[in-house]
Amino acid sequence: EGGYDPHAIQAKWQQLWAERDPFRAGGDDDARPRKYVLAMFPYPSGDLHMGHAENYLYSDIVARYWRHRGHNVLNPIGWDSFGLPAENAAIVRGADPRKWTYANIDQQKAGFRQYGVSFDWSRELHTSDPEYYRWNQWLFQRLYERGLAYRKSSPVNWCPNDQTVLANEQVVDGHCERCGAEVVKKKLTQWYFRITDYADRLLDDLDTLEGHWPSKVLQMQRNWIGRSTGADIHFEIEGRAAKVSVFSTRPDTLYGATFFVVAPDSDLAAELVAEASADVRMQFQAYLEKVQKQTDIERQSTDRPKTGVFLGRYAINPVNGERLPIWAADYVLADYGHGAVMAVPAHDQRDLDFARAFNLPVRIVVDTTVGGGPTLDELDPVATGAALSGEGRMINSGPLDGLGKKDAIAGMIAELEKREAGHAATTFRLRDWLISRQRFWGTPIPMIHTDAGQIVPVPEEQLPVLLPNVEGLDLKPKGQSPLGAATEWVTTADPTTGAPARRDADTMDTFVDSSWYFLRFLSPSSEEHAFPPEAAKQWAPVDFYIGGVEHAILHLLYARFITKVLHDMGLVDFDEPFSSLINQGMVILNGAKMSKSKGNLVLFNEELDAHGADALRTALAFAGPVEDDKDWADVSATGATKFLARALRVAHDVTSEPGTDAAAGDAALRRVTHRVLADAPGLVEQTKFNVVVARLMELVNATRKAIDSGAGAGDPAVREAAEVTAQVLDLIAPHTAEEMWAVLGHEPFVGLVEWPAADPALLVDDTVTAVVQIDGKVRAKLEVASDITPDELERLARDDDQVKRSLGERAVTRAIVRAPKIVSFSTK
Ligand code: ANZ
């Protein structure tokens, strides 16, 4: 495009931005209202990619928008720089994970600068800096004091290849999310955060985010937390002193229980089988080994044959004294509810499948028939294979007979309470958050193991516990943290007695780092606080948060949890971290996800070199709705370049002086300009960035038309249109916008200019009077839109009553239409 040199323009403005730092957030003396705009911070995996290009474009548009609306905007950037890839790269290349990490950060930083993102660079942070992770350690100790950080031994997901513990969500279909190896269960003593204490609040407060977060994310969070209400029911076990509890959502069906099932991998199963015959014990052992290789997902899948072992023991039904045989079966999970169930095969499908497989009795206690439908005989679950899970009237249930479900549940709970055999109860799917990792590149857990076997916090004045030097350490995963081999580092003193002690050698899950980073941006170099509570009051919660849907569950749940803990500590006055959330779609290619292995990567750097930042940004913003996937094959960066060149040329063509009053200018063009001013805020706030681009294209076209064929380059309306174009274009293509602004005779920076208000007088739909002539005589006048089409005007004229009356029987032989003013009919 002649005259438009995007690379020269962007270099010029990027240098000026770097020198003057115009996008730094205002301080305490800044009285403007505040907006905190944040994109999920990047992991420094290498160069920026097209996903980054999209994500940080959107947050930049929103940040720039609020500046134009007179707000003090915080739009910070940092790096989520601890984690496995750095460590794995270090193992493969024998390099220091630090070097790998910080080299990548430098590369990404340069990428963001070249892309023209208006970050407040003064607040840059890296979670792998001691200045940051020191506060992870502070946070850990606060949770520990409150009983929210604790150790327990439990079966954990273990990746035999990476030799590390994985969180449930890092296990995909039974395989390690990272390396694909089959995950097994292993018992380990680990650190946990007691997120389950917050399960109710984490669930209930999702209602307050309705309409502000994608409903899909809210639903995923709800399912993940998974609250079920029902009852705990206590069963006596023959030959065992203590009762065993089960959790049931259907205590109303207790009279229909015909057997009892325990999870094979539960302590209870091990205990119960211990007294069984040698034969049963062997059978059980073989079964257990098979079960331990399965994932929870496989165990819960309904379409596989039911398997199990009868343990030779009996539970006693507390309401009718019946003996229920106890089985171990894999469809019951050890860590849900109490790891045991009362089986009601007539009304629970899993129990029915099991009963049919092992010929166990089935007793119907809910009559689910409806008038005119099949009879209870016809519905017999044993014959049909379908459990009667619907609602109905209780039968075969003693005092509950005749009741509906709700009353029967209440009645049964009252009965259980009277007999001290149970009570109402709630169960969650949510598990406590396993936070310890046996890896090097993370935050050291700030705890000390004394030789006396106690675990005590590292005294606050000794924080941070710095990572040791990596030299001499073997980072290859071995199931123990590599830090344990750093002898000098790991050896410490008992803070009270001075006796020799050992540091905890595990490091924290990096989700701890990202659970509160948005608060650290408020004062990233503070040595006194994780974040100053005063600043949190002013800036937080985050007003606009954007990131990929892959973080819909864990990151957001953990950030919500930690926010609630900080709230309970009195450190923040809100208890949800992100007031609004957007998930952007993916950048794909020819309908497929881009990946290195498929060889279909569109490289950010190459696109940037080929088209420049503004064309890339414009093309991406124009490519479609924020939430949709964008197919790069359909995106035209050259089209974007043409548009930007046209916009800049308009600015060059303007001949009137800055400050010229536009009031006397071309009214039609002014109306287009003021429509853009009026509509842009709503469009941006609804994240319809593609429509903003479309509207700018219309405005530039209208301006060009006015210059070439209408008012001319000297018309003040043309200047006004060009200035508004620069002000709004700044959201999308900030270098070109700054250049236009300078060409139009203004001082930098257009990015800081408040948008003028639209003139309401120019927004009303404007009409003109059209005359209708018949054989040269004016017969009617019509009020019509000034931009009416000739066809439409002719149709209105023919339909007009006065015209019809004047025409009478005569037919129109010829019509001449000059929209919007004249319609001329001939009848001769
Ligand atoms: C008896 C019963 C009768 C049940 C009936 C359901 C229907 P949700 O809704 O997912 O919370 N259950 C309890 N603990 C279990 C465990 N550790 N592993 C597998 N299943 C378990 O499911 C609650 C129901 O799942 C409970 O209610 C229990 O079966 C079973 F007509 O109790 B129910």
Image (cartoon, rainbow, N blue to C red):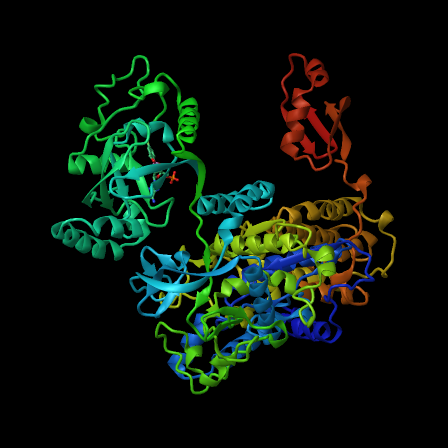
The image position of residue 151, as x and y in percent, is: 45, 62
* Residue 529 lies in quadrant: bottom right
**Relative to 39, is 717 on the left or the right?**
right
Residue projecting furthest to the left: 279
Q: Does residue 648 sit above or below 761 in this rendering?
A: below
Along the line of sight, the residue nearer the viewer: 512 or 212: 512
In the displayed orientation, state which residue is furthest to the bottom. Answer: 472
- The percent coordinates of residue 441 (x first, y second) are 47, 74
> For this view, does 556 lie left or right of residue 352?
right
**Quarter in which the C terminus is drawn:** top right
> Residue 112 at x, y = what percent?
60, 69
- In terms of image quarters, where does ligand 1 lie? top left
Q: Is residue 387 above or below residue 494?
A: above
The image quarter containing residue 35 is: bottom right
Name the residue nearer the viewer: 736 or 778. 736
Residue sitting nearer the eye, 672 or 265: 265
- Residue 175 rendering spot, x and y as whole percentages: 32, 60
> Can the viewer see residue 727?
no
- 81 relative position to 680: left or right: left
Q: Residue at x 48, y 74 (%)?
A: 450
Using residue 193 as the reference point, say whether residue 338 is left or right of it.
left
| Placement of 819 over or under 625, stated as above or below | above
Instruction: Report the residue at 67% width, 64% height from top.
Output: 531
Q: Quadrant of the N terminus?
A: bottom right
